[in-house]
Image (cartoon, grey):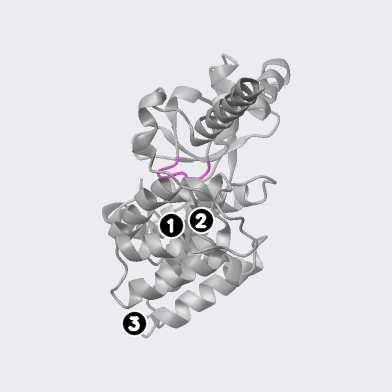
Amino acid sequence: MVKNSSASLLTSVDDLFTTQEERDEAKRETIMEIPLSQISDFPNHPFKVKMDESMSDLVESVKSYGVLSPVIVRPKDNGEYEMIAGHRRKRASELAGKENIKCIVQDVTDDEAIILMVDSNLQREKLLPSEKAFAYKMKLDAMKRQGGRPKENGVPMGHHFLEGKSREILADNSPDSNTQIQRYIRLTHLLQPLLDMVDEGKIAMRPAVELSYLTQNEQEILLNTMEWEDCTPSHVQAIKMRQFSQEGKLNEGVIQSILQEEKPNQKEQFRMPKERISKYFVPGTSNQKIEETIIKALELYRKRKREVEK
């Protein structure tokens, strides 16, 4: 982050030699045109800037009308700026060939910047589970740091009380409930490939939360077994894995046994080791393509067999 302990010390010293009016004036918003090259991205920004149809439309709009709503930045110690809200507009401006962008400049602390950055993005209609997960975690951590500062008697608030209270406040100002926010934050404990499956809809939210309690090594074994079995765990199966993990009994054999259990309304499936047929396919061929090819081959075989029997 931009501000450090020494910067905080300087700020406190400055407070001794400035009036409250002068400090308030320094905190006020100012709007100015700033070169794009002088604006860096927010550290660990959790929201993805996608090159999709929506971005293409935004680029065309910026070309025609410019950026209608100013982005929000804060000054850095080196004289440049850090983006708080407006990463998509900044990228669209770059693609549109613009050199400058209209900015609202706010001189805020690290934690204030995190909260402002998250709040300005959470209201978007389409957000991935992973985006919400890391955004909520960043904001909750910032809120706890703000609330955990020592009071006048020098005694900070209790950790558990502070966390619970911060989460309640976070839920009051967010589109999700306290419980749902807890679930999203648990997703930050998943390995990236598993988190990607949640974003892609291959693993539902509730089983994903259960899987987040597995150790990293257990999650790696799970990923390999899922690929081998060509399946994803149900909520019930994920709960079983979490229970075995808590008992220190979750291993490759247990994971495989759980994944092979028949799920409700699951049709009986025929399985074959992939090594037996891999030589007939180009490396990287998807399981769906392999299945379609085998079905077509069997249909052709049956057709020729019937012709021979005539």
Q: Do we see residue 261 in this rendering?
A: yes
Q: Which quadrant holds residue 272?
A: top left
Alpha carbon of mark 2 to alpha carbon of mark 3: how far? Answer: 33 Å
Do labels 2 and 1 touch, CB within 8 Å?
yes
Identified by mark 3, the residue type is Gly
Q: Residues within 10 Å of mark 1 (few under 14, many from 20)?
A: many
Residue indicated by mark 1: 188
- Name which of mark 2 and mark 1 comes first in the sequence: 2
The residue at which mark 2 appears reads as 133
Vertical order, 166 against 291 (above or below): below
Helix, strand or loop for disc 3: loop
From the viewer's side, name the closer residue of 232 and 7.
Answer: 232
Decide if residue 27 is in sight here. no
Left-right relation of 61 to 71 = right
Q: CA distance from mark 3 to mark 1?
A: 33 Å
Disc 3 vs disc 1: which is toward the camera?
Answer: 1
Q: Which residues are magenta?
A: 42-47
| Front in this rendered view, residue 74 or 232 | 232
Which label sits in the foreground, 2 or 3?
2
In percent of the image, x 42 and y 53: which residue is there?
A: 110
Indicate the secondary structure of the residue bearing disc 1: helix
Residue type marked 2: Ala
User: Which residue was labeled with disc 3?
Assistant: 154
Residue farthest toward the front in the current orientation of the protein: 310
Q: Is residue 103 or residue 165 the one in the foreground?
A: 165
Q: Position of residue 165 (x, y in %)?
A: 53, 77
The local secondary structure at tag 2 comes to helix
Answer above or below: position of 242 versus 4: below
Report x, y in % for residue 302. Answer: 60, 28
Residue 281 picture quarter: top left
Tell me which corner region of the image, top left, top right, bottom left or bottom right, holds residue 267. Answer: bottom right
